[in-house]
């Protein structure tokens, strides 16, 4: 038996060696659909995510992954796909080269299908052998263990045949698509579901799963936690396989027996899964397509992996092995196995953990050099100071190449890495005001907490959906469910519109106070209402110079409003579904939006089409945030992951997993090194951007966290939640306690301290107002806002 296994292994190694031969179709090489391969890479390459074409770079990646001897020997790539098992039929594939060009293969398959349909099975078998095609081509219903009642020849035509065709067909440069049934509205669905036709005896699924469960429960404690990660993805795929092959009662029994064993943070996914009880339900189901198109990533130590491999090979457990091979990506690391708490901290996302390579790219998290503006002498007379406050001396921007005034920050991007707007005179004046305010800023510390000023929206009738405050804290805006946007002045200065064109012609344009003269005092009021959206407004953002306001809505548009005329200037149409969030860049001009279509888009105010599309999330993009240096964008999603995108090239630079629910709040620390995130699980997680690791967990909130904000100097992190509280955390202590030596470990994870209570500086309750927004003023007063909920 052992010798037989080795023979089969040799043939699988031969197949691996053929990988670099030109003219081979990808799908035939690896034995699973092209569609999967395009999505197997969790870091989104734009073309790969958008469709099922595999670009050259992806193809190169795919070629390097499966080259292993199947016994854990490392072939230059630790994190690899599992190689075919000695017992599996995939590994026993013929080592004879298959028919060359894809067109020939299609013709061959069509002929084989015709022969099989007309009960000429012997002829079909001879042709298959001659052509060097694998056995599964003939057995369209798949599975050598299928009983006589399962999948006779009468069922072999139609959907399964076309899906098999699509599996073996490579995407040609001409864009030839796999044939599908007439009237099929989603051609991809057949390809996506096709792998589930490879089924075994439905009665044995429970036996297989129970056997694996028993084995994992019997291994040493150090391995048990790691191997238990396999349960959830296996459970999902085995259940879906039963449903796809019309074994409804077996699927139901399997679900009832084992769904209770899964981790509590998959509860919502299991609820959706339980509603899929028939093959028809699977078509067009988003959750299912997520499970199918993204490989579930597990991070396991080499020792634990070897244990699992040996067990499955000894038992000849092909059913489970095939699922692991096709739907899971095992990221193997050398070193000690991780503990249960370490695994729990990182797991919970829709597609498992992030691969370690996903967080290896260099991220320039340093800040850009501030323009050199001389601060005028501090005079007692405030008015005179404003008059004289015009910049006297400013070096041209070209001179500053990302170097700090003292010494160059090695982690800062170059000043010209992405084009940023030139500073206007009004921006320079604002910088001067900012610097003056900064000199009066209160230094916060655990024994010197900020005052909190809470703005309560009364009579909003739960219609308040978004809030933003300008950087200088002079304006506050609210987005409402009745599709309006309202802007209020927080200072005694009222909101005024610019005069009409006829009146503007009468103004002396050379006068010093021309900016004051153009405003129409007759229009002065404490608030203004902006009409234009045709659905609830879910996201709003002020431009840094306070002249524009962005709003995003359920109607699929992002609108740009002028705060001088209080009218809509542009409607940006790119999203097809509700847009959940939008945010201006810290330098203005650029802004980002994210929505239900799972894509975040980068825009410039003067372009009506997006400049970049950040695709890769498996569910809605629920919140967006610019990095302080404007070179990166962070997005949080309902797939329970956070991604950091490079604005320059659109690449995904970081993937953070660990939240157990959709993410609704993100905040960068002022120095750009750290990111805080909040979600429906009531936890605040802290991330080190440079190393790509979770470095802290703050527990205390009992409901969804909707707002996070660092104080101006980064000393304190404030979090606002639906549990009607604002909590203050000691951010400096959380980051200073980190042992940076831990970051260099090969395993790529550190042990998190459970010190939430030590870091919690204060909890402030409202009467009955969920906290929707937080904002630190330039002097470190904390402003909070929300709608009273009677």
Image (cartoon, grey):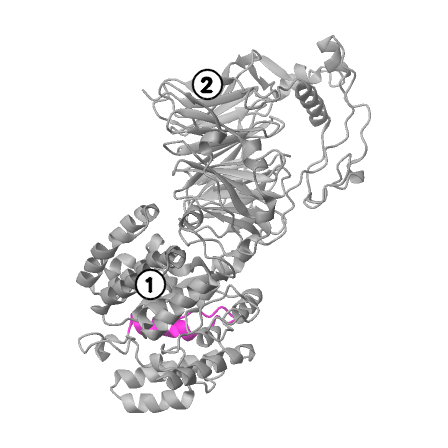
Q: Is residue 652 left or right of residue 1?
A: right
Point out the stretch of residues depicted in magenta.
158-178
Q: In this view, does 86 lie above or below 514?
A: below
Q: Of 279 and 527, which appears nearest the observer? A: 279
Q: Of 240 and 467, which appears nearest the observer? A: 240
Estimate the spatial distance between the alpha carbons at disc 1 and disc 2, rounded to whole Å: 53 Å
Q: Is residue 223 left or right of residue 143?
A: right
Query: Which corner quadrant of the image does residue 473 belong to?
Result: top right
Looking at the image, is mark 1 or mark 2 nearer the viewer?
Answer: 2
Q: Does the magenta segment cover residue 399?
A: no
Query: Which residue corresponds to mark 1?
Result: 184
The mark nearer the N terminus, 1 or 2, is 1
- Is residue 653 visible in the rendered image? The answer is yes
Query: Which corner quadrant of the image does residue 509 belong to?
Result: top right
- Is residue 690 visible in the rendered image? The answer is no
Q: Where is residue 543 in the image (x, y as percent from the top left)?
A: 59, 30
What residue do we see at 72% from left, 33% from top?
Answer: 370
Q: Can you tell which mark lies on residue 455?
A: 2
Q: In this view, does 719 lie above or below 306?
A: above
Q: Of 465 and 90, which appears nearest the observer? A: 90
């Amino acid at each position: 038996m052992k010798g037989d296994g080795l023979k089969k292994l040799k043939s699988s190694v031969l197949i691996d060696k053929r990988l670099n031969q030109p003219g081979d179709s990808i799908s035939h090489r690896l034995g699973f659909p092209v569609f999967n391969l395009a999505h197997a890479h969790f870091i989104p390459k734009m073309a790969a995510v958008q469709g099922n074409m595999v670009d050259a770079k992806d193809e190169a990646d795919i070629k390097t992954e499966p080259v292993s001897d199947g016994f854990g020997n490392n072939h230059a790539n630790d994190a690899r796909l599992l190689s075919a098992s000695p017992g599996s039929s995939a590994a026993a594939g013929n080592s004879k080269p298959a028919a060359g060009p894809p067109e020939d293969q299609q013709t061959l398959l069509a002929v084989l299908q015709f022969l099989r349909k007309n009960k000429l099975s012997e002829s079909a078998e001879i042709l298959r052998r001659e052509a060097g095609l694998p056995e599964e081509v003939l057995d369209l219903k798949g599975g050598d263990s299928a009983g006589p009642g399962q999948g006779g020849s009468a069922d072999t035509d139609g959907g399964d045949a076309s899906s098999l065709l699509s599996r073996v067909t490579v995407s040609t440069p001409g864009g030839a698509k796999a044939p599908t049934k007439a009237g099929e509205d989603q051609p991809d669905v057949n390809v996506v579901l096709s792998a589930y036709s490879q089924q075994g005896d439905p009665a044995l699924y429970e036996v297989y799963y129970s056997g694996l469960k028993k084995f994992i429960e019997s291994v040493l404690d150090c391995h048990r936690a790691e191997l238990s990660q396999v349960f959830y993805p296996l459970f999902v795929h085995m259940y879906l396989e039963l449903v796809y092959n019309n074994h409804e009662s077996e699927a139901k029994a399997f679900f009832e027996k084992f769904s209770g064993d899964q981790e509590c943070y998959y509860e919502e996914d299991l609820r959706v899964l339980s509603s899929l009880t028939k093959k028809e339900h699977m078509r067009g189901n988003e959750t299912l397509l997520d499970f199918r198109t993204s490989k579930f990533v597990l991070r396991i130590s080499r020792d634990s992996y070897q244990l699992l491999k040996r067990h499955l090979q000894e038992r000849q457990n092909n059913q489970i092995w095939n699922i692991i091979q096709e739907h899971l990506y095992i990221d193997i690391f050398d070193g000690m196995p991780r503990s249960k708490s370490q695994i729990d901290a990182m797991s919970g996302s829709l597609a498992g953990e992030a691969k370690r390579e996903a967080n290896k790219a260099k991220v320039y998290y340093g800040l850009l050099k501030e323009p050199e503006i001389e601060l005028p002498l501090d005079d007692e007379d405030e008015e005179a100071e404003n008059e004289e406050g015009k910049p006297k001396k400013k070096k041209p921007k070209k001179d500053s190449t990302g170097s700090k005034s003292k010494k160059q920050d090695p982690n800062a991007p170059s000043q010209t890495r992405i084009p940023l707007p030139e500073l206007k005179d009004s921006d320079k004046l604002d910088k001067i005001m900012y610097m003056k305010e900064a000199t009066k800023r209160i230094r916060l510390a655990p024994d010197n907490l900020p005052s909190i000023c809470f703005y309560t929206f009364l009579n909003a009738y739960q219609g308040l959906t978004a809030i933003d405050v300008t950087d200088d804290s002079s304006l506050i805006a609210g987005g409402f469910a009745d599709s309006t946007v309202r802007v209020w002045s927080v200072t005694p200065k009222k909101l005024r519109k610019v005069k009409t064109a006829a009146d503007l012609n009468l103004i002396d344009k050379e006068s010093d106070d021309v900016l004051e003269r153009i405003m129409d005092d007759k229009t002065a009021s404490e608030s203004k209402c902006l009409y234009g959206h045709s659905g609830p407004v879910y996201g709003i953002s002020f431009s840094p110079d306070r002249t524009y306001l962005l709003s995003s809505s359920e109607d699929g548009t992002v609108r740009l409003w002028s705060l001088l005329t209080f009218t809509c200037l542009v409607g940006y149409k790119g999203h097809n579904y509700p847009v959940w969030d939008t945010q201006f860049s810290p330098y203005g001009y650029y802004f980002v939006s994210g929505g239900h279509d799972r894509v975040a888009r980068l825009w410039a105010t003067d372009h009506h089409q997006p400049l970049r599309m950040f695709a890769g999330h498996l569910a809605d993009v629920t919140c967006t945030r610019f990095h302080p240096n404007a070179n990166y964008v962070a997005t949080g999603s309902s797939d329970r992951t956070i991604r950091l995108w490079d604005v320059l090239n659109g690449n995904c630079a970081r993937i953070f997993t660990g939240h157990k629910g959709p993410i609704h709040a993100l905040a960068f620390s002022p120095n750009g090194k750290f990111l805080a995130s909040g979600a429906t699980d009531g936890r605040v997680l802290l991330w080190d951007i440079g190393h790509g690791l979770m470095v802290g967990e703050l527990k205390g909130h009992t409901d969804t966290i909707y707002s996070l904000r660092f104080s101006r100097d980064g000393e304190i992190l404030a979090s606002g939640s639906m549990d009607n509280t604002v909590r203050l955390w000691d951010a400096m202590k959380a980051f200073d306690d980190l042992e940076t030596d831990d970051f260099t470990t090969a395993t790529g994870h550190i042990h998190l301290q459970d010190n939430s209570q030590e870091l919690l500086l204060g909890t402030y309750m409202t009467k009955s107002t969920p906290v929707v927004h937080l904002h630190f003023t330039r002097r470190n007063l904390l402003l909070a806002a929300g709608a009273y909920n009677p």
